[in-house]
Image (spheres, grey):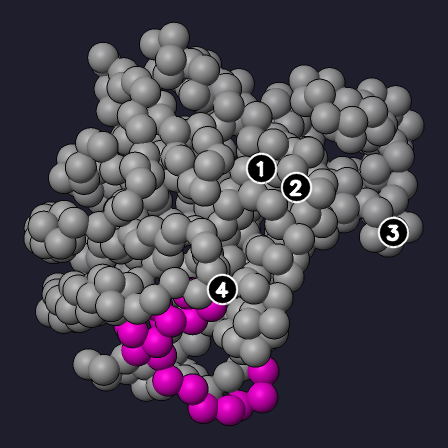
Amino acid sequence: MSKLFELISQSADGKQRAGVLHIGGKDIPTPVFMPVGTQGSVKSIDSSSLIKTGTKIILGNSYHIYLRAGIEVLKEFGGLKNLMKWNGSMLTDSGGYQVFSLKDLRKLSEEGVEFRSHIDGSKHFFSPEKVIEIQRFIGTDIMMPLDECTHYPSQLIEAKKSMELTLRWAERSKQALESSLPMYENEQFLFAIGQGSMFPELRRICMKNLVDMDFDGYAIGGLSVGEPLEMMYEMTDVCTDLMPELKPRYLMGVGTPANILESISLGIDMFDCVLPTRNARNGQLFTTKGKINIKNAKYKFEKNVIDENLQNGVSDYYSLSYLRHLFICGEILGLMMATFHNIAFYQWLMKTAREKILTNEFRQWKDIFLQNYSEID
């Protein structure tokens, strides 16, 4: 198996790192943000535009792709990336979060999870082995194993039981990958997901066991589920202390620009979140100077461009007034432009953070950026 991750630099005054993911002959600088394309589509933006934002890797979801488009369509097209004409890289979640969020539609057991489709009520069963098989058909570059995420708050006994099930499923997932045949030519990597709720000792036990199993990368799951920010950062810090230095570290489902920068300082390399696309559709823009609500009347006559610091042909070309006009009129183009801009901002944030790590200026830059990153409205 080829080397997935190369560590380029680690700060002398903290845990922040700059590296490169090597996937299918493509180099992806880290830290990296992955826009969420749950159903084979990053909402309100097409694949060619995603490339223009600087995006090199996106996230898909095995649960949703299994239900629609379905395995037969994936077979016909040779995988999800061919179906959606995406030439970049892809990581797919296992459906474990749906086990968490759709609790009224599922039954959990040692063998896996039986659930009713949220689309038509039909019954399906996901085992760790089945999830690996689905991701083989999807043709993703990085697979995530089936896991169980606990709610917040949870009791110690509940979190321990869930963490131990996640460990057993992780081992079965690794065995399933090793014993199965690839569907397509691309090399596929498997990450592990650490659980343990908000109990540091459970987090340590889980991560130590996963590291012993020797996965290609390591993720932190079960955070950003309603816990205080300080607790999220504490659990992240606990986990990154135990993650191998020469393998990628992924914090799942996080988050705001502040969340991401603070987590980079704790040693995280990879992020995903629906925030930039979801907020864009609601008219909230992330800019290099702060957040704005484009629907506000103050932008009705504003001739300044959306963000002159982002050189991408959208942010530095169209006026705030025009974008507001599109939203007020309910034009779909407004959603598309706002989505493009927000994703471009997140990619700028990752690129700039990496540059500052390489010049050993990250901590100072982060503190100044977050201090100035205030609401414009």
Q: Pick whichever, 283 or 337, lies toward us.
A: 337
**Residue carrying label 3:** 331
Instruction: In the rendered view, tell whether residue 195 sits above or below residue 294.
Output: below
Does the CB distance between marks 3 and 4 fall below 8 Å?
Answer: no
Q: Pick whichever, 3 or 355, lies toward us.
A: 3
Q: Residues within 10 Å of mark 4 (few under 14, many from 20)?
A: many
Q: Residues within 10 Å of mark 2 (few under 14, many from 20)?
A: many
Q: In which image quadrant can residue 231 be found?
A: top left
Query: x, y (%) of residue 304?
Result: 82, 20
Look at the image and give the residue range highlighted in magenta: 119-137
Task: Give amino acid for label 4.
Answer: Ile
Give the Cα distance between marks 1 and 4.
20 Å
> In which quadrant is the C terminus drawn?
top right
Task: Give amino acid for label 1.
Answer: Thr
Q: Which mark is residue 138?
A: 4
Whichever of labels 3 and 1 marks the residue nearer the N terminus, that label is 1
Instruction: In the rendered view, tell whether residue 116 sits above or below residue 1.
Output: below
Does the CB distance between marks 1 and 4 fall below 8 Å?
Answer: no
